[in-house]
């Protein structure tokens, strides 16, 4: 476990507190109201979403590859008022059979996975036909000037928060064979301009549409 990972995990909740209060907590609540059935959450971090799942969720499984985050996630999962299964795994290599889940949740994760297309293909693989991906991500801007700034500043973003600020995440989701049926754009508060463009929404994997992965 690197010192950078340990430090990131130890400071993550405090670092995010103002942004959560200003907007993210509300976006999480709205997004997860649509989660149902057997749910997989990837890159669960410290467990910020655990309390937002509603009664229409039958089971909750959360994966997280980073050992420092995983310890915090397990503590939150144990304190939850319902069973939560926690596993150590990267999104690029999900340890589940095909068609295991009704909903997959990704919040602030697809910006930081090592191979975004592979991760989205894996999400597609483990979802049941007509299953749903719920996402909340900061992404590459549609405005060319902001996107160029994101490209220039990405080294700093990587250094500070261990992810890319310039990924075309919606394109990766579509390329995996999903139909994006809802997207809202938001602006991340308390962030530098290159981290502000965000999207939240849902995508469906219809039966019969070929998967890219
Ligand atoms: C910015 S945090 C977001 C945590 C949480 N999802 C949230 O909404 O607060 C990014 C998380 O993605 C995890 N992560 C990094 N690489 C990953 C990968 N390849 N697969 C899945 N998760 C990954 C990190 O360890 C970290 O917990």
Image (cartoon, helix red, strand yellow):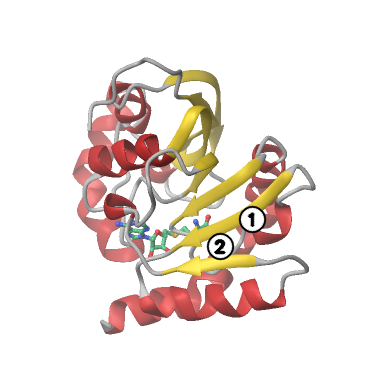
Q: Helix, strand, or loop for circle 1?
A: helix
Q: Which residue is mark 1?
A: 20
Q: Quadrant of the N terminus?
A: bottom left
Crowd around label 1: few <14 · some 14–19 · many ≥20 (10 Å): some
Proximity of marks 1 and 2: CB atoms separated by less than 8 Å: yes
Q: Residue at x 52, y 30 (%)?
A: 131
Please indicate whether residue 15 sits to the left or right of residue 154 in the image.
right
Dividing the image into four quarters, tell me where ligand 1 lies.
bottom left
Q: Helix, strand, or loop for circle 2?
A: helix
Provide residue 183's location: percent of width, then percent of height.
Answer: 54, 23
Q: Which residue is mark 2?
A: 16
Please indicate whether residue 56 sits to the left or right of residue 73 in the image.
right
Q: Which mark is residue 97?
A: none
Q: Nearer the viewer, residue 203 or 22?
A: 203
Q: Quadrant of the C terminus?
A: top left
Provide residue 166's location: percent of width, then percent of height.
Answer: 29, 39
Q: Residue at x 44, y 24 (%)?
A: 205
Please indicate whether residue 206 sits to the left or right of residue 17 in the image.
left
Mark 1 C-beta closer than 8 Å to ligand 1 = no
143 is higher (above) or lower (below) than 46: above
Quarter-of-image position of residue 18 = bottom right
Provide residue 34's location: percent of width, then percent of height.
Answer: 68, 35
Between the C-alphas of marks 1 and 2, the distance is 6 Å
Please indicate whether residue 151 sits to the left or right of residue 13 in the image.
left
82 is higher (above) or lower (below) than 49: below
Provide residue 65's location: percent of width, then percent of height.
Answer: 35, 67
Q: Residue at x 40, y 41 (%)?
A: 126
Mark 2 C-beta closer than 8 Å to ligand 1 = yes
Quarter-of-image position of residue 3 = bottom left
Crowd around label 2: few <14 · some 14–19 · many ≥20 (10 Å): few
- Disc count in the image? 2
């Amino acid at each position: 476990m690197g010192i950078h990972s340990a430090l990131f995990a130890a400071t993550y909740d405090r670092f995010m507190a103002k942004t959560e209060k200003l907007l993210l907590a509300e976006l999480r609540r709205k997004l997860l109201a649509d989660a149902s059935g057997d749910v997989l959450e990837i890159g669960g971090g410290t467990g910020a979403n655990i309390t937002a799942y509603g009664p229409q969720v039958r089971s909750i499984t959360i994966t997280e590859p980073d050992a420092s985050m995983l310890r915090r996630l397990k503590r939150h999962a144990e304190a939850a008022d319902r069973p939560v299964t926690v596993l150590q795994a990267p999104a690029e290599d999900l340890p589940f059979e095909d068609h295991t889940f009704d909903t997959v949740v990704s919040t602030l994760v697809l910006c930081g996975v090592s191979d975004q297309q592979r991760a989205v293909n894996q999400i597609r693989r483990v979802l049941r036909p007509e299953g749903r991906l719920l996402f909340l991500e900061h992404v590459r801007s549609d405005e060319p000037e902001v996107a160029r700034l994101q490209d220039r500043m990405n080294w700093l973003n990587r250094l500070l928060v261990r992810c890319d600020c310039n990924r075309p995440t919606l394109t990766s989701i579509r390329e995996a064979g999903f139909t994006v049926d809802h997207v809202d754009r938001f602006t991340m508060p308390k962030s530098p301009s290159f981290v502000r463009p965000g999207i939240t929404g849902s995508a469906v994997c219809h039966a019969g549409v070929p998967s890219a992965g």
